[in-house]
Image (cartoon, rainbow, N blue to C red):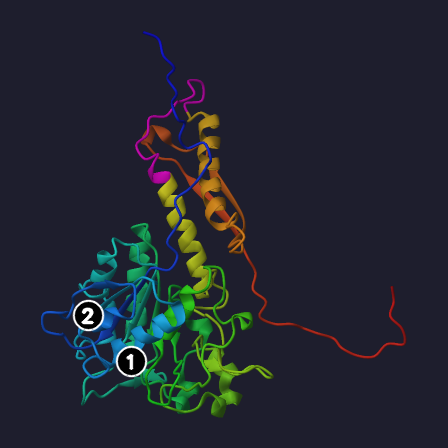
Amino acid sequence: MGGINIVRAKGQLGRTTPTEDAVVCMVFSGTAVATKIALSEPKQIFSSDALEDLGMTEGNNPVAYRDIMDFYGKAGEGAELNFMLVSDATNLTDICNVTNDIAKKLITFTQDRGVILLVNRKPAAGYTATITNGMDNDVWNAITKLNEMAVQYQTKNAPFVGILPALYFDTTKISEIPLRSTLTTDNVALSTACEKADGHISMGALAGWLVRHQVSENFSRIASGPIFNTGFFPDMVPSLNLKNAWSAINNKAFMYLYKEPGKQGYFFNDDSTMTTVSSDYSSISWNRTINKVHRIAYTTLVEKLRDDVDINPVTGKVETSLLSDWESDVENDIIANMVNTGVTKKPEISGVKCIIDPNSDILNDKLDVTIQIVRRGQVKTFNVKIGYVRKIEE
């Protein structure tokens, strides 16, 4: 008996799987809660209400409780947060060391989805900081270790950007801090930003503020509004007291809170990473942007891994028509996720081009791919001339 067989075509609309731009991981010094949460036990939550379920209070876990409440105060309930508690005897360097199963364990818990990693710590009573170059030497060592971890995760196609607290930052020793031009840790930023005069560096609020912004946006942008109504440094010195030193601190790549004339509240000075200004990855936003491109390109190209390809019998190279198709696949996926972002978002890059070398050594199973990205710009200085004229020239 005859019939009509109708088959629904799939994949014709060019729809892509949305990327995850704000999967946050945070490691805190804290205390286990019996039957609720153990030290070094990763947890995933989506609401500040989870703190009650986990038995976590301001009394038994002051750092984590405050930062998690601050995170949801800025990011909004429903945001994903992955976190872990460690003993207050665990220093930043050990937390960030990729050979230790601490920060690495938390990222693994997210199945390498974590794209932003932050750490906050309140050292145990009796801890004596070794002040080197203006802050605890443990922080300097942790910057190096966290950058090493980030580089290793880039080779795993799971890039992230890290942010650390500038513990024991001493506002009387700013001159001892190395100039930014001597730094090379592209993947790590450092914050001195404290909402209150109690030494607590506001890492949770920073994380929540960060996820509100698209990857290409500098979260210090004035249009986003102030993050706090007050601002201090970790040694409890009001930010305004160091107004004349702001430029010097900025030149050391430290993030801090400052006031913009005529504006209410406090803003971040920038989103710098601990590297020279000449680096392509000298800001958190530029790291987040290239990391997003990296993950999209990997997702597209991995589908073609170990694929059977046609070889031109005359040249012995891959057919150029196939290479063109693959180049378009990469470009289209990046454009779909970062350029054609819809009415609620701005484009996150200005342009993309994928080039697969037609002379690649395919007989040794390799193709050489270059992805060129034109990033968006950020206006950090206006040079304005103002004055009287006799008449306005047309």
Q: Amino acid at mark 2?
A: Asp
In the image, residue 388 lies in the stretch drawn in magenta:
no
Residue at the image position 42 percent from the left and 67 percent from the top: 210
Q: Which residue is mark 2?
A: 53
Q: Residues within 10 Å of mark 1 (few under 14, many from 20)?
A: some
Outermost top residue: 1
Residue at the image position 31 percent from the left and 61 percent from the top: 80
> In which quadrant of the rendered view does residue 329 lie?
top left
Q: Indicate which disc, 2 or 1, sits on the residue closer to the N terminus.
A: 2
Which is more toward the observer, 12 or 326? 12
Callout 2: SS: helix
Left or right, residue 224 beside residue 101: right
Callout 1: SS: helix
Residue 323 visible? The answer is yes
Q: Position of residue 158 (x, y in %)?
A: 32, 53
Q: Position of residue 364 (x, y in %)?
A: 32, 31
- Please report the bounds of the magenta region as a residue range: 301-316
Q: Quadrant of the N terminus?
A: top left
Query: Please, is residue 268 above or below residue 1 in the view?
Result: below
- Mark nearest the camera among 2 and 1 is 2
Q: Which residue is mark 1?
A: 137
Outermost right residue: 390
Residue 189 visible? The answer is no
Q: Position of residue 381 (x, y in %)?
A: 61, 72
Q: Residues within 10 Å of mark 2 (few under 14, many from 20)?
A: few
